[in-house]
Image: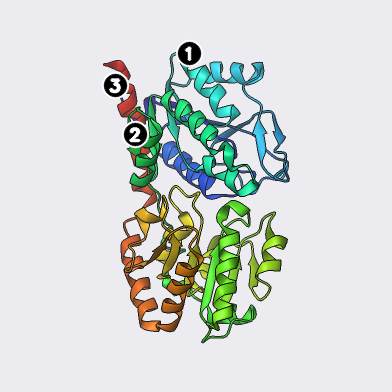
Amino acid sequence: MQPSDLRVALFSGNYNYVRDGANHALNLLAGHLLEKGVALRVYSPTAAKPAFPPTGDLVSVPSIGLPGGRGEYRLGLGLPASIRRDLAAFRPNIVHVSAPDFLGHRAVRWSQRQDVACLASLHTRFETYARYYGMGFLEPVFTTMSRRFYNRADQVMVPTPSIEALIRSWGVTKPIGLWGRGVDHDRFNPQARSLEWRRSLGIADDEVAVGFLGRLVLEKGLDIFAEVVGLLRARGVPHKVLVIGEGPARQWFAQRVPDAAFAGFQRGDALGRAVASMDVLFNPSVTETWGQVTSEAMASAIPVVAARATGAVDLVDDGRTGVLVPPRDVTAYADAFQRIIDDPELRRAMGAAGEAKAQRYRWDTANQAVLDAYLEMLERRGR
């Protein structure tokens, strides 16, 4: 079987209406598949003003805004008759689901009823979200639901070995493959650094900029970030906080890091400039499955201080390209930053080691692993 024999129906809870790391990866995968001759059709909720144009043919799935102050995200309402007719006309031989949401569950059920091969990819640790919104007691329930979801697929793809180990511990028994991530090295590199841009934000050339990069949402560990910055301030450790991104928790965060420079949402080469203009990236999130911001900082020769959690443990070499810290140990975080801030040579050495390691992260290689998994899955079913 050749790639041109494949007809892939890709289901996403958010393909392009809000920009995030997961749909960035999905759109790059779509481009790779189309380039290889795969027929592709994408099914996702949509919005009147999407964050960016979709790659490939996008079919809008009926949806509603999520409750609880997160209405920027939409919940797909399943597969109504119009979508099922569209699927029947497209005749996929692969169904690819990218989230264990309502739409994903309905797509898996459709694939089983139609005897179509199903691949599920894991992008985000949704089971951890409950703890950030006062509902930590629901985490075991979400874990159980996720185990059932992934065990209904023929093949599961995860970004890192730590995520494979995690879902095996949940009881997922299906074949698991690795779909890593890449970095746009033309955009994310040390040469993109701009002292002039830093100065425009009030960051002096000799100040150490501790950077946050991502959507400003509680599940990114903003509470820990704020506590660590407060402890550094109390210790008198000189630094400047640089925040790159926007999100519903911006005001909450700004109140807790009042001296921070907020650069807002950045895209394209401006994002590469912003990342390279940090001096150290702080990623306290425990929800990552890869940590795109971590790999992009490494490619830009920026050392990383991160939670010792899935994703980061596969990217950061503790003590060499950055520092890994127990997820909520504020004192240990502050100690790590104090050491890195006080030692310019250590920052340089960690940045150089991170840049060298990040050279292996290539999108073509990562996405080819998914295409190969499609073909192998169909071969298994044929046997």
- Mark 2 residue crowding within 10 angstroms, few (<14) / some (14–19) / many (20+): many
Q: Position of residue 39 (x, y in %)?
A: 46, 29
Residue type at mark 3? Arg
Tags 1 and 3 touching, CB below 8 Å: no
- Looking at the image, which residue is at 55% across and 60% down? 268
Q: Where is residue 150 in the image (x, y as percent from the top left)?
A: 44, 29
Lower sequence index among marks 3 and 2: 2
Q: In which quarter of the image is the N terminus?
A: top left
Q: Quadrant of residue 163?
A: top left
Element carrying mark 1: helix
Residue type at mark 1? Gln
Tags 2 and 1 touching, CB below 8 Å: no
Lower sequence index among marks 1 and 3: 1
Element carrying mark 3: helix
On the image, numbered disc 3 is attached to which residue?
A: 380
Q: Position of residue 91 (x, y in %)?
A: 49, 18
Residue type at mark 2? Ile
On the image, numbered disc 1 is attached to which residue?
A: 114
- CA–CA distance in space, label 1 to label 3: 17 Å
- Mark 3 residue crowding within 10 angstroms, few (<14) / some (14–19) / many (20+): few
- Looking at the image, which residue is at 51% across and 87% down? 206
Q: Where is residue 3 in the image (x, y as percent from the top left)?
A: 36, 30
Give the residue at the far left of this rendering.
383
- CA–CA distance in space, label 3 to label 2: 14 Å
- Mark 1 residue crowding within 10 angstroms, few (<14) / some (14–19) / many (20+): few
On the image, numbered disc 2 is attached to which residue?
A: 176
The residue nearer to you, when weighing 131 against 146, is: 131
Q: In which quarter of the image is the C terminus?
A: top left
Q: Which of marks 2 and 1 is in front?
A: 2
Element carrying mark 2: strand
